[in-house]
Image (cartoon, helix red, strand yellow):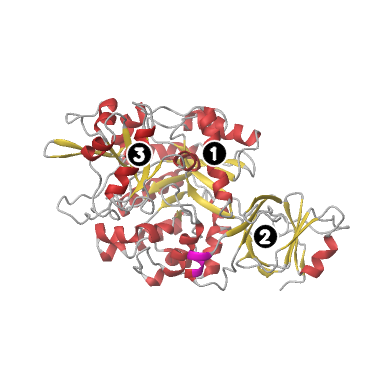
């Protein structure tokens, strides 16, 4: 254990003169400062940044009359967690929707009852919005049907979104409002499902655009409230940083204004890195570029991250684009969202404008398409540290890894997908492809510095199932998804902290508890370094969250 660390490693500044007294001191704890920094007893904070770390007795010299001292009483602390891929605005909104997750609605009858109950409380014609079902976990092992939604909500339009966010099922009234019927053409990169010549209500990917077009758009007040609600929820899990992975999906360019208003009004609870939606017909990139909002613009609290395009859907929903067919008679290989030439042009344009690219690609065919587009852009305009990302990257191959290493392309996965969806992957792809998905240990060993996240509201932002899946590679049912991809708790925490910062090109600013870096700290009820995976999953909580030296969440209410 270091005696006292007051070096300025993060910015290279030297140490001279007398040191100021700390604003905040945490002492008598077990504080994990980073994978290569070890554990200390105490930490001192000054002006929102780490001043020093070391033994409690040594840090005591930095305590002055105005210093707030918190005795951790042996509790465990880490750098604030960084959820490197979620949808903050969507999380805030869906917290008010019908909870269709398996825990709340494990059966079709329960799901329909919840939708019917919400419809009964709303005025006629008001939308019923629900999210979170997974057909592989429902008792009927299929998607709900339009007629079933009609039965429980005949007078209110319904949109029920699958957990992945790429598929929805609607009732007849919603489809009528959207102008979708049996004669509607299927758009490129979309799916309008029919059986025996009739709509089932299921729409996938681009086919859902007409539905979203008739759902009332949120105003700025709604957007700010969603940012605040979702951000406060993240703080309760020790998450102090996140990426909003598709800014512009609900409120267009107005979401940029909403984020800046939330920051001005001190209603932005977490540090947020913004991924700008770039998909054709919905892109906010040109407006952002005209306003000078390119990657790196902003500050430690709110920053423009990069540009995002969707290349495919989800594996569990059978819309991720694969080179080989899914199991089933239809022999589908998923959905290709963008033609090669169009994607190449979009990536080249964003790259030339100076943006980092952070594109959604899950299936191996989509990953191949994206790597090719990235390689083309980097060859035309070299930039060895642009750090273009592949969001999810669930079914990458060894050959693709070699190309990614050479080009400086990084996977940015969500390992909680193994816990929540691993069994679904096996059911739709078979064991050979399903079990080896999201090869986290392989990425670690190759030096990719993979971050992790939740993709919330796809999965809960709760970090403990995520950590559990990294440690065990077990699904919620106990299926082991290739034990060779397990990592240690130190590696898992590194992914949640240091590598999350790296994915945002902010590793010099946050991600470790070392002098000069931001004083973002999470305190947990259990020492994660010596807890069993089951203890982490079932009985660990965040007790205290500190952002920039300020206490922003206190579960026990005693600080």
User: Which mark sits nearer the N-terminus, 2 or 3?
Assistant: 3
Kindly check if marks 2 and 3 are in contact, taking CB atoms under 8 A apart as contact.
Answer: no
Residue 301 to residue 428: above or below:
above
- Closer to us: mark 2 or mark 3? 3
Kindly check if marks 1 and 2 are in contact, taking CB atoms under 8 A apart as contact.
Answer: no
Quarter containing the C terminus: bottom right
Quarter containing the N terminus: bottom right
**How far apart, in angstroms, are the residues tagged by discs 1 and 3?**
27 Å
Q: Name the quadrant containing residue 232.
A: top right
Element at badge 1? helix
Q: Dot 1 surroundings within 10 Å: few (below 14), some, or many (20 or more)? A: many
Q: Residue 513 got which mark?
A: 2
User: Which mark sits nearer the N-terminus, 1 or 2?
Assistant: 1
Residue 5 to residue 64: above or below:
below
Q: Residue 117 got which mark?
A: 3
User: Which mark sits nearer the N-terminus, 1 or 3?
Assistant: 3
Query: Could you say where residue 464 lies in the image, as x and y percent from the top left?
Result: 50, 61
**How far apart, in angstroms, are the residues tagged by discs 1 and 2?**
27 Å
Residue placed most toward the observer, 549 or 393: 549
Query: Could you say where residue 215 lies in the image, as x and y percent from the top left?
Result: 37, 29
Element at badge 3? helix
Query: Could you say where residue 146 lies in the image, as x and y percent from the top left?
Result: 23, 38
- Closer to us: mark 1 or mark 2? 1
Span of residues in magenta: 535-539
Residue beneath label 1, please? Answer: 227
Please identify the dominant SS of the magenta region.
helix
Left-right relation of 302 to 120: right
Q: Name the quadrant containing residue 178.
A: top left
């Amino acid at each position: 254990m270091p005696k006292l660390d007051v070096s300025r490693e993060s910015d290279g500044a030297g140490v001279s003169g007398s040191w100021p007294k700390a604003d905040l001191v945490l002492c008598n704890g077990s504080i994990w400062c980073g994978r290569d920094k070890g554990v200390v007893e105490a930490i001192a904070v000054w002006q929102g940044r780490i001043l020093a770390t070391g033994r409690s007795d040594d840090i005591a010299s930095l305590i002055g009359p105005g210093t707030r001292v918190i005795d951790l009483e042996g509790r465990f602390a880490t750098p604030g967690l960084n959820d490197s891929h979620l949808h903050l605005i969507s999380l805030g909104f869906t917290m008010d929707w019908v909870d269709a997750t398996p825990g709340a609605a494990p059966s079709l009858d329960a799901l329909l009852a919840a939708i019917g109950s919400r419809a009964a409380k709303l005025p006629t014609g008001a939308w019923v919005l629900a999210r979170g079902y997974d057909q592989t976990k429902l008792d009927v092992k299929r998607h709900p049907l339009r007629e079933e939604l009609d039965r429980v909500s005949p007078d209110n339009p319904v949109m029920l979104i699958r957990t992945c966010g790429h598929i929805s099922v609607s009732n007849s009234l919603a489809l009528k409002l959207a102008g979708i019927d049996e004669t509607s053409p299927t758009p490129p990169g979309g799916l309008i499902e029919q059986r025996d010549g009739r709509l089932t209500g299921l729409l996938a990917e681009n086919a859902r655009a007409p539905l979203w077009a008739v759902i009332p758009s949120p105003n700025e007040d709604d957007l700010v409230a969603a940012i605040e609600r979702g951000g406060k929820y993240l703080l309760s899990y020790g998450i102090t940083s996140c990426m909003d992975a598709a800014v512009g999906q609900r409120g267009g360019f107005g979401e940029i204004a909403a984020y800046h208003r939330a920051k001005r009004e001190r209603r932005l609870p977490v540090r947020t890195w913004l991924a700008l939606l770039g998909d054709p017909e919905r892109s906010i990139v040109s407006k952002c570029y005209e306003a000078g909002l390119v990657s790196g613009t902003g500050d430690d609290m709110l920053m423009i991250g990069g540009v995002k395009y969707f290349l495919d859907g989800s594996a569990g929903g059978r819309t991720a684009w694969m080179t080989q067919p899914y199991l089933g008679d239809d022999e589908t290989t998923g959905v290709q969202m963008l033609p090669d030439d169009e994607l190449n042009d979009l990536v080249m344009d964003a790259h030339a404008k100076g943006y980092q690219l952070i594109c959604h690609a899950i299936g191996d065919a989509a990953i191949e398409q994206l790597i090719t587009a990235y390689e083309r852009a980097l060859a035309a305009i070299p930039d060895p540290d642009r750090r273009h990302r592949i969001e999810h990257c669930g079914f990458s191959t060894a050959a693709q890894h070699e190309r990614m290493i050479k080009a400086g392309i990084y996977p940015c996965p969500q390992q909680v997908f193994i816990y929540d969806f691993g069994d679904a992957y096996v059911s739709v792809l078979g064991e050979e492809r399903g079990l080896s998905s999201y090869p986290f240990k392989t990425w670690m060993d190759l030096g990719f510095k993979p971050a992790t996240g939740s993709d919330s509201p796809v999965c809960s932002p709760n970090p403990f199932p995520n950590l559990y899946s990294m440690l065990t590679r077990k699904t919620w049912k106990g299926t082991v998804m290739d034990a060779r991809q397990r990592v240690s708790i130190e590696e898992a925490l590194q992914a949640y902290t240091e590598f999350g910062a790296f994915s945002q090109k902010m590793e010099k600013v946050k991600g470790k508890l070392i002098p000069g870096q931001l004083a973002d700290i999470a305190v947990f009820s259990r020492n994660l370094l010596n807890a069993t995976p089951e203890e982490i999953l079932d009985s660990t909580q965040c007790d205290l969250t500190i952002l920039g030296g300020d206490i922003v969440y206190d579960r026990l209410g005693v600080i």
